[in-house]
Image: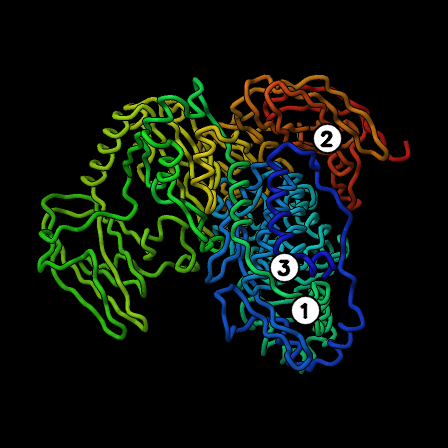
Amino acid sequence: MSDSVSRRSALGFAAGAIAVAAAATAGLAVPSHAAGRARRGPGAGPRVESLVAGLTLDEKISLLHGARDPESLGQAGYVPGVPRLGIPPLRLADGPAGVRVAARATALPAPVMLAAAFDPALARAYGQVIGREGRALGQDVLLSPMVNLIRTPYAGRNFETFTEDPLLAADLVAEEIRGIQGEGLIATVKHFALNNQEKDRMSIDVRADERTLHETELRGFEAAVRAGTGAVMGAYNKVNGTFACENKPLLDDVLRDRWGFEGWVMTDWSAQHSTGRALAAGLDMEMPDGTHFGAALKRAVTNGGVPEAHLDRSVRRILGVMERFGLLGESVPERPERDPEAGAAVARAVAEAGATLLRNTDRTLPLTGRAARDIAVIGPTGRHPFVSGGGSAHVVPDRADSPLDALTERAGRGARVTYAPGEDLYGKEIPRSALSPAFDAEEQRVAAGREWTYEGTLTLDEADAWTFVIHYSGERPEVELAGTELFPPVPGVGEFFSGGLVSTAPDGLNVRRATVPLTGGGHRLRITARGGDQGQTFRIRRVTAATRAADVAEAVRTARGAHTVVLFAYEDATEGQDRTSLALPGRQEELIRAVTAANPRTTVVLNTSSATSMPWLERTAAVLQMYYPGQEGAAATAAVLFGDCDPGGRLTQTFPVDDAHHPTAGDPRRYPGVDGVEEYSEGIHVGYRWYDAEGVRPLFPFGYGLSYTTFAYSDLTVRRVSGPGVDVSFVVRNTGAREGVTVAQVYVGPSPDLRQAQAGRALAGYRRIVLRAGERRRVTVRVDERALSAWDAKRHVWQLGTGRRTVHVGTSARELALSTSIDIKGAGS
């Protein structure tokens, strides 16, 4: 650990984090492209070599796999260390959007919202918050950031990563890692590699050619290595026929030999499939247990099947990183105190900077005058804050205010703000008259060690589709209807990973749903609930056609009675499962149509994970994309809606029109795979490149986003600099009446000298710019050699794309205001 890390004070962090966040959102000059040479660890020094020599075989093996933590803090993993030699334990916590332990932490906006700011400096501040809090909460290793590209809009973890563009992904992951590790927490970049979907993720064989790998998915991982990441997490899936966690071409040939990575490689949880083969391929640590690297590894070493030198190599890598971070020796860095206020400041800055305005007709936003004084708030996430996605991204927030409360406070005294849910996420009470014998289905308490049962009849007056909603605090109650269990265990990890909104009631109880078509008349009902060690509370509710119709009718009345409507819509994504449609779930589209028909002055606020189809778009007055905005999301949403800040975000993924028009649509070999094999046959044409190559019109292009003001771009010049790079210079002027944000994007066309398929244009640089009304600024964006190069799969090197190349500057991949060309020459030309 460097002196700057070990001596960082709590005060310094708080001031620094807020200052960086402020700079990132105030238009100060920040690098348009995160650059940096490889910052490798110092290698195995004398202390590490001495420790390796002093370890017994059992002790070495104990460092190579996870174990049960005797003093668990609720983190994901634990490695016990070797106390007799002063090797401390390692605690490993999830943390793509904040530290995930059984304690409160700053719940930051989802990484996809961070990425929408197009601001590497803000990514570093984001990392600083997580790094400091991870250390403060007793953690040593962060299982983040995730840098897999957004390849299909269905992927359940798109909100946990950044973008479909390799350059932007590389810039952001590098800066976030610098922020995390600058606070003394070891970062783990994941999932290496091609883990771009949750469907069949444990077994799918992903096939991609060498050029596609290097020009798309691997670019972010390479940037993470150059930024000094301490660890890399192998993916679940296979890559070109071999599981990623025992894939020598990935783990040794690329990661270590080509990129010079000196840290350690761990598995994703239970992603390992062999012992000697995985160790020889370059895997160092099995998590969360020792199925393959425990007793099986000891037997393999003892009988000569695995050289002990292979163990020593992995132990050396782990200890080398621990030494680099000051975790070995007599004086280890003190753990800081949490600074919730500094964390909250960064969380809000990210949410405001990433808020992306997609539609704004007739200056509906910002809300002013009567529109700001007479508001109907509609939608379940208008009242229940949608903080984070589900699975390993979920964080226990310090706080999470209701958007309804934030909007009411911001509207001020004398304003009228009304509310209607529009859709009931948590169910309505089952009438006692429908149950025979009657019982209180709304609140049942089962004492510890006891069992509660009910047997009776549920009677319906007419046929209906009921959604049964069970709320419970302990073991999920068994509910049988006509002999069929309504809530069986979810297969795979689905039992453990659930969404961040719909699976938890406002009072903290777990929630599951089951929809069943029922005939009129009686239905046999049996419920069994167990108290377990702690006792538990449960309730069972229902949603029916009648309750849904009543909710929509109430929303329509509320909308008609207000001048302006702010309708919150959601999509609840989680690790372990992919989406099945780009449409909003449930009957939200029906709700939007009904509300916009009642009041056309409706703004839709989207709390969604990824791209969403919008057949209702033209009926709305405005659409604001807020993703999963973290604990400060309510305040940030209110600030953007009322114009206290400009919506600063731009799309880092293309939004398709519908399920039939995107890069993986219509070809199951591309997604989700056929017979266990998935082909990245689109090659380098990932994201917006595919839309350009295929001539497909998106709903919203990559890089798109509106401001509350207007900008003019002019006077484009491009000049060569030392080496093969170029400087792209242009003037940006705020032509509106208020301060605002624009994100200037530089795209470069193909090289005439490269004899291989190329993108029609690819992002080569960008700059987030904040200008006052009337302000004019000349901006220069450096386009480096890598952005001008393509991977030569025959020679296994990057090849500069020379010749006359077009340079575009604009505000999205489809809105290119300026164009020129320049001759690109080799370094010796």
Q: Residue at x 27, y 75 (%)?
A: 449
Q: Nearer the viewer, mark 1 or mark 3?
A: 1
Name the secondary structure under disc 3: loop
Task: Work out how far the residue at label 2 is from the one at label 3, CA to CA, in angstroms.
Answer: 32 Å
The x and y percentages for residue 758 are 69, 32
The amino acid pointed to by label 1 is Val
Q: Nearer the viewer, residue 5 or 607?
A: 5
Question: As drawn, which residue projects farthest toward the right?
Answer: 828
Asked if residue 799 is positioned above or below residue 308 in the image, the reply reads above
Name the secondary structure under disc 2: strand
- Look at the image and tell me whether residue 240 can be seen: no
Of the numbered discs 2 and 3, the one sitting upstream in the chain is 3
* Residue hosting label 2: 781
Q: Residue at x 31, y 30 (%)?
A: 376
* Residue hosting label 1: 332
* Residue hosting label 3: 185
Query: Which of the 4 quarters of the picture holds residue 423?
Result: top left
